[in-house]
Amino acid sequence: MSIIEVNNITKTFKVAKKGSGLKAALKSFLKRDYTTIEAIKNISFSIKKGEIVGYIGPNGAGKSTTIKILSGILTPDSGKCKIMNMTPWKERKTYVKKIGVVFGQKSQLWWDIPACDTFDLLKDMYDLPDKEYQETKNNLINKLNLQDIMNIPVRQLSLGQRMRLEIAASLLHKPEILFLDEPTIGLDAVSKQQVRDFIKKINKEYAVTIILTTHDMTDIESLAKRIILIGKGEVLYDGSLTKLKNLYSVKKYISITTKDKLEIKHKGILQKNKTKNGYYFIINTALLNISNFLNLVAKKIDIEDVEIENENIDNIIINLYKEFEI
């Protein structure tokens, strides 16, 4: 059953043209020329309860516009959107009590006071019963290891600590849907892993539906089984990450350890480099599969060791952008 239904959503913005130089500035001041930009064009998709979906695309693709419409901040020019049987921008007061939003570059925490005070304020904003609030808060504090930072002014905390508090704050009212925009931006490796593990945990334990927008493809690979790729305001791909990898991950990176000298040429071998301990190859598995490649090599040299790496997700997405010319 779908918890989010988006049908043919379109949103345009009127933007003032600005020329360079004093003459253009004076002309613009007296009479402005405008141009219309289509941020998103007839976007449609549905998301089932409990899914984690990566919503990705380059800068200016329309991701933020979509998320703002889904969270009830913007009203589309046309199209329909039903989330939990509500229209976000029409039933916003009721709707926002059932969603959580975390923007990596915008904080909902008060900068000069401890997070515990902001949490208490959010309790009153969402009109949460005392017992329920305390149970939820304590649960979040324990699972996100926030015990030592709850009473420290937010401005004194590290970025990773603040981000964990942001996620906790967005979950105090037990939302059914969580919108995450760049949740690990600027975090170190340990903090990123902590945030990812917690996102997986709340998704599994509470069936929270999560829409994740990020430029960090490791986040996508770690969390989302499905991605929606948007470019130039349109949905270009909507499907499983595994299928996308199978379609575009034809390159394999193979390191062979050997003491022997190797001369080899074959269709499908894209690159061969001599290394300290042997050779490094890039092969196209659409033309030469790994088994046949290794058989060819084994006939010529003694192989001491082999390491095989897949095309990384960043390169797959870059190639996808190139294919769609975005």
Image (spheres, rainbow, N blue to C red):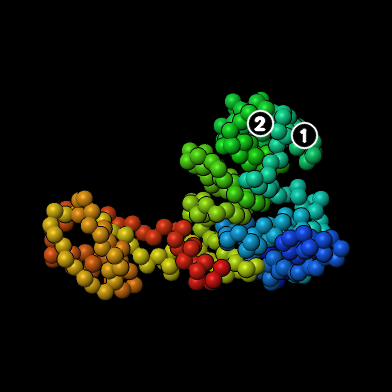
Label drawn at residue 321:
none
Q: Nearer the viewer, residue 201 or 301?
A: 301
Q: State the residue at coordinates (80%, 39%).
A: 125
Identity of the residue drawn at 66% across and 31% down? 155
Name the foreground residue: 83 vs 32. 32
Q: Quadrant of residue 252?
A: bottom left
Residue 109, given in percent of the width and then of the height, sits at 70, 37
Tell me the residue at 58%/61% (across/down). 57
Label 2 environment density (alpha carbons within 10 Å; few <14, some 14–19, many ≥20):
some
Q: Is residue 119 visible?
A: no
Residue 80, horizontal then vertical, whole percent: 75, 68
Vertical arrangement, residue 320 with respect to residue 163, above or below: below
Of the two numbered discs 1 and 2 on the same chain, state the one appearing first in sequence: 1
Residue 57 in sight here: yes
Q: Mark on residue 155? A: 2
Q: Is residue 3 left or right of residue 124?
A: left
Residue at image mark 1 = 121
The residue depicted at 56 percent of the width and 57 percent of the height is 54
Q: Quadrant of residue 85?
A: bottom right
- Say which quadrant the C terminus sits in: bottom right
From the viewer's perspective, tell me whether residue 287 is left or right of residue 132. Answer: left
Q: Secondary structure at mark 2?
A: helix
Q: Nearer the viewer, mark 1 or mark 2?
A: 2
- Graded by Cα atoms within 10 Å as few (under 14), some (14 to 19) or many (20 or more), the crowding at tag 1 reads few
Q: Position of residue 94 (x, y in %)?
A: 80, 51
Label 1 sits on what residue type? Leu
Q: Position of residue 250 (x, y in %)?
A: 37, 67
Position of residue 174 in the picture relative to residue 297 (left or right) = right
Q: CA distance from mark 1 to mark 2?
A: 18 Å
